[in-house]
Amino acid sequence: MNWTAPCARGTADLAAAECRGLGLRVTGERLDGVAFEGDLPDAARALVHLRVPSRLLLDLAWFDARDADALYEGVARVAWEQWLDPHATFAVFASGDLTDGLRTHVFVALRTKDAIADRLTRHYGRRPDVSREDPAVRIVLRGRQGRWHLGLDAAHPPLHERGFRAAQTEAPLKETLAASIAMAAGWRTSDGPLLDPMCGSGTLLIEAINLALGIAPGCTRRFSCERWPHHGARFRTLLDGERSRAVEHARRTVERPPALRVEASDLDPVAVAAARKNLAAAGLLRLVALSTADARTRPLPANSTLLSNPPYGERLGGEDVVALYRELGTAWPRGDRLHAWVLDGNELFAAAFGHEPASTRPLRNGRLAVNLREYRF
């Protein structure tokens, strides 16, 4: 079987590295995802343990189509009877590039749905039902310059929904992006203190701790492939085993954690309260010293790794956000051997912060172009 793990632009190398770390055979790396070969146990392991990808798709076909007839024929060639039966609901979700002959994603999804339903009707003698609200099988069609990738979505809800978000602040960081930042930073418990002085609801902190402790992001959640008509029971058995082992590892690790020092703070007490709830939901609250403090004046532990997602907006609490960047650029270099990783979502940040980054990684936070900047002081 061939699988695609879509991920945000700028993170494919990180996703490929973690796939290899799980023993998966990576066969390709693209701007928007990673391809690997594997059987159902490999896919179950990927679902429970992958941090950076947003989904996991079982590849069914790649074909060229620039008009409705070619699209129909490409979809109809797939042996849908191996994956669907007449009693299981399905839905089609289309995205990506369009062509002159395929001008809307709605039309692409409808034409794909017709091709699938017609083939299954010929095979089973009855037409299957469609349900966009709660389908048993989610079919994903992604286009790029007239070439289409057809797959089954094994991971709905998306993989960024870990299950620990008990509270959130305005514009929270998506968990998969937070995991990418943590993976790029590479902090380990033996590296000295970890600090997030603008922690918001705690997403970046949680992902960094879970990565360092080897706590699987999907250890307590369910996946859409468990409802697949022909393979759901097998997937469920495999996933139950993976989840059980991962939960036991997490329990032992949190009960007897390695020596680590993690500090987090935010100027906004509402954000600190949200972070406290989320850390508690993730089972990590006892590992973190959490406080309300100003990132410009709080003490910086010596030899620490700093992770931060400063605000991007024009104004923050009546203050010019550019002034905040300047003040952070004055305050943080005072730290003793500070290694800082900052997610910069404002084009004015770099100049206002005033220091040359050791490295810069272009990323995307939703539709917004951002940069992960590394600084050493």
Image: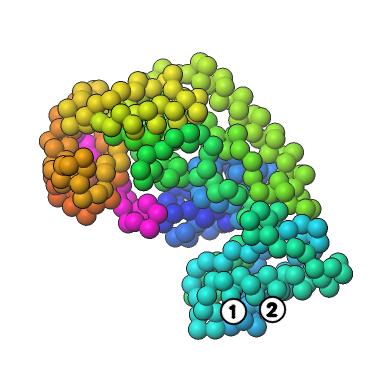
Q: Say few, some or many: other residues with alpha carbon within 10 Å of mark 1 (under 14 / 14 to 19 / 20 or more).
A: many
Quarter of the image holding residue 242?
Answer: top right
Q: CA distance from mark 2 to mark 1?
A: 9 Å
Q: For residue 73, which numbered disc appears in the image?
A: 2
The amino acid type of the residue labelled 1 equals: Ala
Left or right of 266 in this view: 160: right
Q: Position of residue 238 (x, y in %)?
A: 71, 39
Whether residue 26 is visible to the viewer of this picture, yes or no, is: no
**N-term-proximal mark, 2 vs 1:** 1
For disc 1, the marked residue is: 65
Q: Which residues are magenta?
A: 358-377
Colouring chosen for the image of the structure:
rainbow
Whether residue 265 is visible to the viewer of this picture, yes or no, is: yes
Element under label 1?
Answer: loop
Which residue is at a point 60% across and 44% down the rendered structure image? 47
Q: Is residue 369 magenta?
A: yes
